Amino acid sequence: MSLSGAVATRGPSRQVTEAAASELTWLSRYVVLAIVCVGVFMNTLDTGIIDVLNPVFTAQFHLNLYLEYWIELSYAIPLIGMLLPAGHMGDRLGRKNVFLAGMILFGCGSGLLTMMPTFEAMFVARVIEGVGAALISANGGVLAVSVFPWKQRGQVLGIIGTAVALGLKFGPVAGGFLSDNFGWRSAFLVNVVIGIVFVILGSMVVPPSRRNPGKSFDVWGALLFVLAMGCFLVIVNQAPTLGLDSPQILLCITGVVVFGAAFFYVSTHVKDPTIDLSLYKSRNFSVAVSAAFISFLALTPVNHLLPFYMENVQGLHVSETGLIFITTTLAIAVTQPFSGRWADRVGSRPVASLGLLLQGVGLLALTVVPLQINPDWLVPELALIGVGVGLFRSPNHRALFGSVPRDKMGQAGGYQHLPRQLGESIGETGVVTMFSAVVLASAAVAGIHVDLSPAPVAAVATPVPTPAAAGNGLKPAVVIQPYVPAAQAVSQLQAATGVTNVAGTGTSLLDTDTSDDQIVDVPDDSASDSSDSGLSQAVTSLPADVQMLGYRLMWGLAGVIALGGAVLSWYGRDEEEQAEHAAVPAASAPPARQRIPVVAGSSR
């Protein structure tokens, strides 16, 4: 290979990056980093707001379980599907332009949410938010790293990771406070204000990014990837509800196979693919992506099961659960900047591997928690898990960015967030399904019969809150009935009531009387302690000792998975990154500007 080809295809040169970073003052670099942190914080803040307001949306728009899932999917599909194409767009059009466009789109989507009159309008607003979040996530980290010296990339990525963790925890708090005091629509005005302020500030402060306008954009590759990921996410989220043999799921399975095969063919035959599969030839890249997926997958049993353990087994209130559960987030937020800086000094491999090891040990420690215990004793285990996750993420992201060529840095930004989204989506469904199966099997062994068969509509008497119950502060009983498709529900209702024709009566089909709903009839207590997990009431109402077997099994499995990730992280990474880390002693290195090779046709 010629000298020009070697320089053009080489990984992100430390010398070139140092020279670019030296053009900015210390204050300007941290202002750019702050803008990026606000962007990713805005994304995760909105996720927490939506989580706490889901019951409000379900009540206001009279949504069944199937439609309620689409509140999440309408955001997750464009976000996950667009992460890698958005990174490619940043490489081609300039990361500053794409990042600020993402903040504009996200702010516009949030603004539409404050005005949405129907569920369909909400669906469109969530799609716009998802696309904007993908543009921000894929380009934010790369933009921040590009303005700092290359040797500080671990510390920079750690600070961004702290913003992500804090946004996830402050979202439910902010959403609940604003909804209680100013109405639920006010919760989304926060992102509108943040977007306007920081788009203006970013356009003035963030330096222009390097662009590659001469390259063609692989439209078909991006479209096929979005379609394949969309079908896959529908399968993951809807298969437990609809069944694998339902026509919708079978159609999505076919879509994954067809669109996935077409995407693979296009990506391997075009000159400049949107998603470059050849990056997986690098061991450091493959291990970084795989280890990140494993870490997030292993964390889902804690995120989704521990609140139920605290409330159903330990008898804690939701507020007490939140105070104990926030231990993990605080440990992650505090640890990530320091772990990134540590990795900048000693390399990513030892720090990331140690982090996964501690995460696995913390998860295994939960398996020996007795049935009755002072909840405060859970804090050390959760803190150990949080420290492990914090030690892993920043060094692993650092290794990911260091394993790709400079002109593919945008794709590294996409892969920085893709494992988290996929790990959480797959993990949530898998955890709920496996936990329910284990607990129900344990109940059967113990001689406890659990009736999961759907009851006929006419035979179920749905309790209606009485004035006495409302006056004494007690919540009415919750009756959760199985999901029934609309057509089947109508036929059952006609059979039960004797009404055979409702057409031409001029009566609205919107039923505001919830006393005869066919799906779920629960009071709207979203302002207090309502949460939606996917776990059926039949499972969580079983005796504590029966549930405990499921909790321990899932936490133990997660610990083993995390330890496997630690082995992969230690033995799977090669020594290229360590050689780069020790290549040039700091004391003898000449100024960065004097070490840039001058090559015809190359650009900074």
Image (cartoon, rainbow, N blue to C red):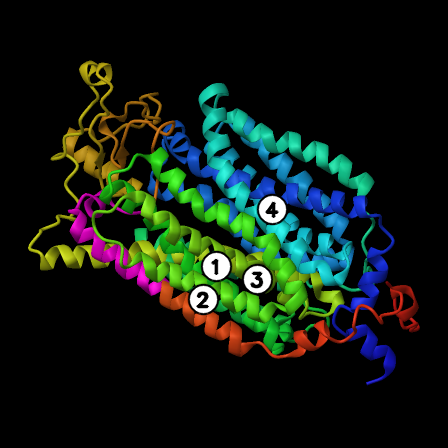
Q: Position of residue 91 (x, y in %)?
A: 74, 59
Q: Are marks 3 and 2 in contact (CB under 8 Å)?
A: no
The amino acid type of the residue labelled 2 equals Leu
Residue placed under numbered mark 2 in the picture: 357
Is 469 left or right of 558, judged from the image as shown? left
Considering only order in the chain, which callout, 3 or 4, is on the residue closer to the N terminus?
A: 4
| Few, some or many residues within 10 Å of mark 3 (<14, 14–19, 20+) | many
Q: Are marks 4 and 3 in contact (CB under 8 Å)?
A: no
Q: Which mark is residue 133?
A: 4
Q: Is residue 594 above or below residue 98?
A: below
Start-end of magenta stretch:
534-558
Element at badge 1? Answer: helix
Front tag of 1 and 3: 1
Residue with the most extreme bottom position: 1
The amino acid type of the residue labelled 1 equals Gly
The residues bearing labels 4 and 1 have C-alpha atoms spaced at a distance of 27 Å
Q: Does residue 549 show up magenta in the picture?
A: yes
Q: Position of residue 46 (x, y in %)?
A: 53, 38
Q: Is residue 244 visible?
A: no
Q: Is residue 246 above or below residue 131?
A: below
Q: Is residue 143 above or below residue 310?
A: below
Element at badge 2? Answer: helix
Element at badge 3? Answer: helix
Q: Which mark is residue 225?
A: 3
**Camera-nearest residue between 159 and 531:** 159
Considering only order in the chain, which callout, 2 or 3, is on the residue closer to the N terminus?
A: 3
Front tag of 2 and 4: 2
The amino acid type of the residue labelled 3 equals Phe
Residue at position x 21%, y 25% in the image: 476
Which secondary structure class fits the magenta region best? helix
Residue placed under numbered mark 1 in the picture: 388
